[in-house]
């Protein structure tokens, strides 16, 4: 388990900081990005075991990231856990998780122990 | 053509005949009558002329004979011989010679005048001593009027009489019953009258004139003396001659006055025409009177007018009777026409008169035959059809009247002076004035004052053009309420086509105005609504943003607290620090729940909540809820009772059912008393529905408030906000969720005793 590379993409620094602290506490190699474009570049240029991707980001959101990866046929090489607001309809989430490369989702507010269960699968 | 007596052809023929006969007859009658009249007067004139001639002729003829006789009587030889006769002895030769001489003398005289039939000479005592005809009886002349006259020195003339013996006429033939008269003349000797010479004159055929002119049976001719006595007449019988007092009287045809004609004659001294006189017998006569020269006697010739006019009278009688017959004929035809034509026609006329007056209940006698019957029949059927149409009209009129009277529209009848003559109930009601107070008033009294001038111009326009259609006028009721109306007219004309008024229809359009106002109001409301919706949307967006923004900070708060409480850190925290972090976590969770509620309510409001319906095992669900609430209820010392038993599966959204139940339970925990609080959750099954209930023994809800508790953000009491908390979304969410699952939710509550919420859901089992 230790040494798994996890990339967290969220515009909220507090959230990425929380994830970074928790994942490092749990022994993960955690990289954070605070905007979609930067996060997309990181995905393309490096390899991560898991990507935690916030769907609601200003300018270039999680959806943009997924679509960009799809265009370059890079999505299926990744394991992405999408981070959604609770107000997002279930169908939308389901259609996201049907994509090859999107492995799971987390609804805000996030129960960190829940994330741990996904990553350890 | 068949001459049918009942056919009008015959009647027309009769009428034509009548029309032809009457004027012709009248004209003919007039002509005949005129001719008759002229003939009458002509005849009268002729008769007068004839009788005058006759009278004149007779008198002259007599005078001639008188003169001749005078000549004889005054002959010296005759006087001398008469003297000898008187003064000599009868048997003396002197007497004999005298007689012989006289015979010779008289014989020659008789030969000279054939009209002298015989001559006799008598002495002053009337004793006849000489006669030309010895066969004649020797009758004393003493009492004869002509003798007496002669004795007095005048010429005496006897009446005319028929000779009672055969006499030789002037033609030398003996004839019986010759009309004769005796003329006597005195023989005057030296010592005065010594005797009287009398001659019998034959009157049968006077030589100087002819009676042929007087070819009438009734011609009378006679001699009268100056005392108006008849002295001679050729026709009168002797018995009649014994009435010498008979007078020739004349009655004035104009005045009826009786005139003594002889007296009248003597006054005038000339001949007199007798026209329009009556004779002694009372018969009307036409004639003439002539004086006999040398005597004081008159000769009268008269003709009985009736006899003379017998032909004319017969003609008159014929004419009068013809006229009479004609008159009766006309009267009969008139009567016929009256009874058969005029009377029925008059009856018909009377009936038509009645019909004209509007009386249709007339009985028409259609008896009889022919065209009158046909006419009566036709008229009868006309009247009945008129009756029918009148009744239809009356029905229509009453319907119309009803329409007018009961119409919801306002009607009034107005004359050209603008006076209201009639109005309907609606009108009177709308204006709030009894009908009898409206009739007779001016239409302008009902117009709103600021519209009076306009109404006047409309009224003048109407009088000129007869047109008013949907013209808007504002009226004023008795209460002063003003209302708009559209007026239209239905003009009334007299028989000459002159405009005399109108039935005016007024459509009260105040409702229209109200509608307009309402529409405007609605538009405003809609605009407001739009604004509200816009605001609502803004609010929703705001809430969405707020809830998102509120939640986002909660993520690191909760997450970091979780890290702190993680077993990796557990040893590094003191007990107090751990309690602080736990407090942060529980409050964060509460805040999370509140935000969830807001978001849920939001979703339900926007109909964005998606119900995933399925058959749900509610018993399990409620058992789970009881388990999760167990510690909380113990903590709050609330008796939490689960009375669910054997309920079927419920067709619903499981999360929604959970939400509703927890909301109601949470709500109940807010209001139960601190001690002995009790909450019961149960369910009943009926009619394919499962009705759940959540019962508490809390403070209860008043009736008024029960109606509003499902409103969003409603708080039972503002003071409760603090003590009981909450956003006031719970019940609103419950109601929306239950309704979204085709269910019903209701509340039963009694203040101070508790509240029970019921909600029912469908069960497919």
Image (cartoon, rainbow, N blue to C red):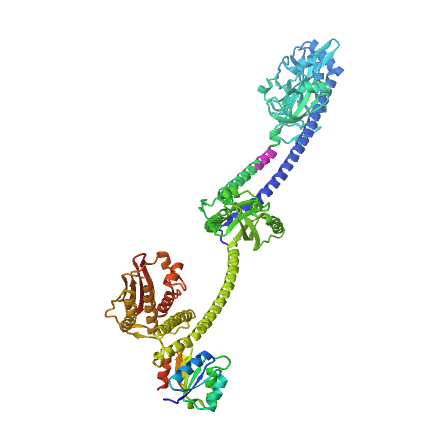
Q: Is residue B455 left or right of residue B547?
A: right
Residue B634 image position (x, y, % from top left): 27, 67
Q: Quadrant of residue B616?
A: bottom left
Along the viewing direction, whichever of A121 and A12 lies nearer the viewer: A12
Residue sticking out furthest to the left: B646
Magenta part, dominant SS: helix
Indicate the position of residue B165 as horizontal and vertical percent values.
60, 22
Q: Quadrant of the C terminus of chain B?
A: bottom left
Q: Is residue B517 magenta?
A: no
Q: Which residues are magenta?
A: B311-319
Left or right position of B348 against B153 = left
Spot occupied by residue B405 in the image (x, y as percentages of width and height):
48, 49
* Magenta span contains residue B315: yes
- Can residue B176 be seen in the rendering of this structure? no
Q: Residue at x 64, y 17 (%)?
A: B229
Q: Is residue B135 above or below residue B604?
A: above
**Identity of the residue drawn at 36% across and 65% down:** B731
Report the front residue among B297 and B379. Answer: B379
Q: How many marks?
A: 0
Please name whichever residue, B528 or A47, is drawn nearer the observer in this view of the structure.
Answer: A47
Residue at 61% in and 21% down: B280
Give the percent coordinates (x, y) of residue B657.
33, 71
Task: Name the side, left or right, on which B99 lies relative to B367.
Answer: right
Query: Does residue B438 appear anywhere in the picture?
Result: yes
In the rendered image, the vertical position of residue B504 relative to residue B32, given as above or below: below
Residue A98, by quadrant, is bottom left
Q: State left or right for residue A102 relative to residue B530.
A: left
Nearer-the-camera pick, B96 or B23: B23
The image quadrant of residue B129 is: top right
């Amino acid at each position: 388990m230790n040494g798994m590379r996890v990339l967290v993409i969220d515009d909220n620094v507090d959230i990425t900081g929380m994830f970074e602290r928790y994942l490092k506490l749990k022994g993960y190699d955690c990289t954070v990005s605070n905007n979609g474009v930067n996060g997309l570049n990181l995905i393309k240029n490096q390899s991560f075991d898991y990507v935690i991707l916030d769907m609601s980001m200003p300018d270039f959101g999680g959806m943009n990231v997924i679509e960009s990866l799809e265009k370059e046929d890079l999505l299926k090489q990744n394991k992405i856990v999408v981070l959604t607001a609770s107000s997002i309809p279930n169908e939308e989430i389901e259609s996201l998780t049907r994509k090859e490369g999107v492995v799971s989702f987390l609804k805000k507010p996030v129960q960190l122990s829940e994330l741990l269960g996904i990553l350890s699968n | 053509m068949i001459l049918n007596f009942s056919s009008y052809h015959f009647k027309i023929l009769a009428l034509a005949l009548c029309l032809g006969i009457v004027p012709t007859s009248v004209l003919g009658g007039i002509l005949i009558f005129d001719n008759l009249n002229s003939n009458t007067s002509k005849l009268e004139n002729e008769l007068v002329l004839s009788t005058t001639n006759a009278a004149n002729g007779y008198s002259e003829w007599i005078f001639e004979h008188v003169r001749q006789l005078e000549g004889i009587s005054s002959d010296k030889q005759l006087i001398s011989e008469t003297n000898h006769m008187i003064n000599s002895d009868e048997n003396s030769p002197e007497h004999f010679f005298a007689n012989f001489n006289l015979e010779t003398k008289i014989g020659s005289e008789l030969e000279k005048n054939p009209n002298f039939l015989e001559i006799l000479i008598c002495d002053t005592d009337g004793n006849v001593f000489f006669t030309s005809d010895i066969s004649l009886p020797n009758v004393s002349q003493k009492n004869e009027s002509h003798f007496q006259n002669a004795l007095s020195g005048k010429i005496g003339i006897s009446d005319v009489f028929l000779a009672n013996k055969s006499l030789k006429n002037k033609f030398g033939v003996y004839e019986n019953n010759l009309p004769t008269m005796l003329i006597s003349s005195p023989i005057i000797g030296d010592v005065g009258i010594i005797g009287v010479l009398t001659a019998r004159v034959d009157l049968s055929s006077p030589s100087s004139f002819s009676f042929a002119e007087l070819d009438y049976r009734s011609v009378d001719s006679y001699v009268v003396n100056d005392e108006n006595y008849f002295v001679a007449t050729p026709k009168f019988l002797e018995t009649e001659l014994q009435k010498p007092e008979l007078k020739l009287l004349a009655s004035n045809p104009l005045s009826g006055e009786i005139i003594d004609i002889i007296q009248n004659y003597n006054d005038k001294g000339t001949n007199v025409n007798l026209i329009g006189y009556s004779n002694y017998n009372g018969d009307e006569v036409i004639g003439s009177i002539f004086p006999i020269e040398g005597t004081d006697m008159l000769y009268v010739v008269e003709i009985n007018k009736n006899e003379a006019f017998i032909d004319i009278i017969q003609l008159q009688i014929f004419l009068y009777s013809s006229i009479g017959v004609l008159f009766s004929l006309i009267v009969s035809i008139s009567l016929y026409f009256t009874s058969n034509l005029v009377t029925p026609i008059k009856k018909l006329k009377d009936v038509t008169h009645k019909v004209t007056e509007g009386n249709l209940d007339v009985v028409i006698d259609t008896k009889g035959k022919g065209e009158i019957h046909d006419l009566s029949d036709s008229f009868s059927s006309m009247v009945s059809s008129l009756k029918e149409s009148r009744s239809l009209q009356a029905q229509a009129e009453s319907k119309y009247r009803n329409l007018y009277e009961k119409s919801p529209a306002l009607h009034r009848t107005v004359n050209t002076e603008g006076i209201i003559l009639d109005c309907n109930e609606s009108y009177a009601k709308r204006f709030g004035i009894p009908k009898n107070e409206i009739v007779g008033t001016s239409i302008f009294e009902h117009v709103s004052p600021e519209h009076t001038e306009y109404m006047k111009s409309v009224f003048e326009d109407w009088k000129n053009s007869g047109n008013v259609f949907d013209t808007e006028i504002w009226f004023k009721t008795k209460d002063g309420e003003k209302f708009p109306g559209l007026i239209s007219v239905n003009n009334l004309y007299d028989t000459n086509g002159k405009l005399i008024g109108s039935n005016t229809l007024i459509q009260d359009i105040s409702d229209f105005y109200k509608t307009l106002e309402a529409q405007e109001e609605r538009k405003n409301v809609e605009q407001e609504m739009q604004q509200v919706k816009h605001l609502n949307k803004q609010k929703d967006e705001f809430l969405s943003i707020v809830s998102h923004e509120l939640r986002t900070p909660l993520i690191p708060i909760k997450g970091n607290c979780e890290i702190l409480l993680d077993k990796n850190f557990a040893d590094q925290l003191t007990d107090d620090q751990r309690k602080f972090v736990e407090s942060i976590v529980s409050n964060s969770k509460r805040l999370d729940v509140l935000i969830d509620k807001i978001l849920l309510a939001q979703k339900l409001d926007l109909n964005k909540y998606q119900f995933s319906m399925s058959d749900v095992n509610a018993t399990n669900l409620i058992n789970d809820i009881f388990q999760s609430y167990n510690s909380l209820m113990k903590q709050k010392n609330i008796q939490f009772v689960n009375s669910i038993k054997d309920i079927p599966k419920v067709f619903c959204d499981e999360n929604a059912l959970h939400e509703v139940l927890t909301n109601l339970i949470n709500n109940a925990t807010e209001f139960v008393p601190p001690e002995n609080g009790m909450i019961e959750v149960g369910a009943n099954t009926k009619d394919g529905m499962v009705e759940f209930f959540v019962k508490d023994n809390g403070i209860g809800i008043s009736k008024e408030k029960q109606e509003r508790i499902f409103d969003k953000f409603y708080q039972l009491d503002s003071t409760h906000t603090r003590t009981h908390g909450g956003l006031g979304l719970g019940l609103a969410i419950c109601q929306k969720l239950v309704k979204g699952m085709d269910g019903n939710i209701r509340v039963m509550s009694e203040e101070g005793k508790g509240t029970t919420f019921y909600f029912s859901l469908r069960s497919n089992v």
